[in-house]
Every structure is written in structure tokens, then in C-alpha cells.
Image (tube, rainbow, N blue to C red):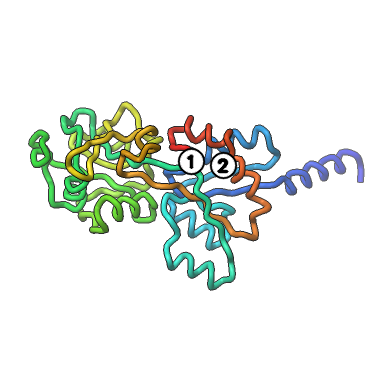
């Protein structure tokens, strides 16, 4: 083999043997994982690739063995645990950060606060006009994530009290789509993770007791005064622990948790 072919062969072998970790899943966790991956790869030779699609998509990829880590904004469901158990695959659950779920409206909306019951009424279709919650005479246009989203599941369980979304609620495939739609529609309302907040939308103050209304923020999520908070998860198969441990440990480290805060999430 001549020197040129030998050099090419060595380079190809080097690329083939470079450690790689594939993450897939939650749109909420996506910006955080991307930032953590960027920071991690500057100091490590491991390549980390991150794609979204929703918690359900990530968990399905884990079940199908097409990703190494499933990013999720909800816990594994019983049927998902059973599938892993029945196939003899042990898994690990790691909480990497906390998040507050913000209910957002268009900045042109004069409504600045809602109770949990009012939010439930809007998303289940009982409340159809903003005048019924102290706003202008304007039809409410509600936006939600799709059912494959962990945020969709969490919102249904913890805010809607497990009631079904109204058929009039418009589902969006990504969180960024909800932000864009709400920013462009005066009568719109939606919900997004804290890191997705921008000046293009207004985050409502929320109350579960009808008395104390609290705005979503890192500080209010940390001190537990904001009522819609949740953990964010990584799931991986135990047999892949050696492969993913360096990256997971980095996120849980002081440096990794600093990135959590910088990216708009709530450190552990």
C-alpha cells in the first residue's frame, strides 16, 4: 500500500472509531442539549449529535435502538417501561435540569394573568372569548404541541387536570412554531418551556389558588412559587452507560449546570 492510500485508510479508521453519542427527543430539552453538546465537544473528542421531534419520538428511538439518549420532558409511560423490560433492556433515568412551563399570549392582549381553572377552560373549549376572562371581545385561538410531545402530556395532566384538549385547539409540531403563531395572532394563547420566551410574546402570571399570581422565571421555578414546573429527563440503556456517562456527568457538573442557567433553564 502506498503512503497516500495508507494515510487515507488511517483517516477513515479514525473517523469510524471516533466516539459518538446520538440524542433525540424533546423539543423543550433540545436547545439545552445542543448548547451542552457544543461546550462538551470543545474539550472532548466525542461527537454529540442532537435532534428534536418530541419526547415520544425520542423514546421510540430509544426503544428502536436508533439513539443513545432519549431527551424527555415527561417520565416514561408504563407501556414504554414494559417494552424495555420485556426485551431485557435495563435503563437509567437522569434528571438533568428543571423547567417552568410558561403560558403565553400575544403582546397586544390586555390579559396578563389567568388562574389554572381559566387555562383549563380555554384549552378544553369551555371558554371561547377573551372577554370571559377580563379581556377584549375577541375569539381565543389556542395552540398546543402535538400528542407525541412530553410538554403536551405534562400540560394535560398538571394544568388541564387530565381533561382532553378541545378539538378546536391547533397542534404545532415544534415549540418554536407556537411562539411564532402566538406572536402573529392577537387572540392567541399557547404554552412553551421557559427557554423559548422572547419579547415577541407575553408570559402570563398564573395562579392555582386564585389569589397569588406568579410569573414564570428561573428564580420563581427555583423557589417553587411558580406552579407549573417540571423536571427534564435523559433516558439511556444501562448497557450504553460507558458510552454516554462522560456527557451525562458533564451536564450534571458545576460547569454543565452553569450552561443550564445560561440557556434559560433551571439548574438542579
- Kindly report the distance in space between the C-alpha atoms of the residues bearing marks 1 and 2: 8 Å
Dot 1 surroundings within 10 Å: few (below 14), some, or many (20 or more)? some
Q: Residue at x 38, y 44 (%)?
A: 174
Q: Which element is circle 2 on?
A: helix
Residue 162: name its quadrant: bottom left
Label pair 1/2, CB-CB below 8 angstroms = yes
Seen from this angle, which residue lies furthest top?
Answer: 199
Mark 2 = which residue? 252
Count of marks overlaid on the render: 2
Q: Earlier in the sequence, mark 1 or mark 2?
A: 2
Mark 1 = which residue? 268
Q: Residue at x 42, y 43 (%)?
A: 28
Residue 131: name its quadrant: top left
- Tell me residue 255's x, y (percent): 58, 33
Q: Residue at x 13, y 41 (%)?
A: 139
**Circle number at residue 141:** none
Dot 2 surroundings within 10 Å: few (below 14), some, or many (20 or more)? some
Amino acid at each position: 500500500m502506498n503512503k497516500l492510500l495508507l494515510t487515507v485508510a488511517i483517516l477513515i479508521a479514525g473517523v469510524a472509531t471516533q466516539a459518538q453519542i446520538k440524542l433525540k427527543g424533546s423539543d423543550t430539552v433540545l436547545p439545552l442539549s445542543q448548547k451542552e453538546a457544543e461546550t462538551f465537544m470543545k474539550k472532548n473528542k466525542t461527537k454529540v449529535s442532537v435532534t428534536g421531534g418530541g419526547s415520544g419520538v425520542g423514546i421510540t428511538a430509544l426503544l428502536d435502538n436508533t439513539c443513545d439518549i432519549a431527551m424527555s420532558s415527561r417520565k416514561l409511560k408504563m407501556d414504554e417501561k414494559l417494552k424495555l423490560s420485556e426485551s431485557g433492556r435495563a435503563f437509567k433515568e437522569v434528571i438533568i435540569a428543571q423547567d417552568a412551563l410558561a403560558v403565553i399570549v400575544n403582546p397586544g392582549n390586555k390579559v396578563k394573568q389567568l388562574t389554572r381553572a381559566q387555562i383549563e377552560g380555554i384549552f378544553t373549549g369551555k371558554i371561547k372569548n377573551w372577554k370571559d376572562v377580563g379581556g377584549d371581545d375577541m375569539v381565543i385561538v389556542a395552540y398546543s404541541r402535538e400528542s407525541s410531545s412530553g410538554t403536551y402530556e405534562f400540560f394535560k395532566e398538571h394544568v388541564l387536570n387530565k381533561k382532553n384538549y378541545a378539538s378546536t385547539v391547533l397542534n404545532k409540531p415544534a415549540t418554536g412554531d407556537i411562539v411564532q403563531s402566538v406572536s402573529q395572532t392577537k387572540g392567541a394563547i399557547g404554552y412553551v418551556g421557559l427557554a423559548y420566551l422572547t419579547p415577541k410574546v407575553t408570559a402570563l402570571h398564573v395562579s392555582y389558588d386564585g389569589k397569588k399570581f406568579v410569573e414564570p422565571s428561573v428564580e420563581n421555578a427555583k423557589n417553587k412559587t411558580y406552579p407549573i414546573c417540571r423536571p427534564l429527563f435523559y433516558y439511556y440503556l444501562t448497557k450504553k452507560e460507558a458510552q454516554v456517562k462522560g456527557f451525562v456527568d458533564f451536564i450534571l457538573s458545576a460547569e454543565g449546570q452553569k450552561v443550564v442557567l445560561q440557556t434559560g433553564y433551571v439548574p438542579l
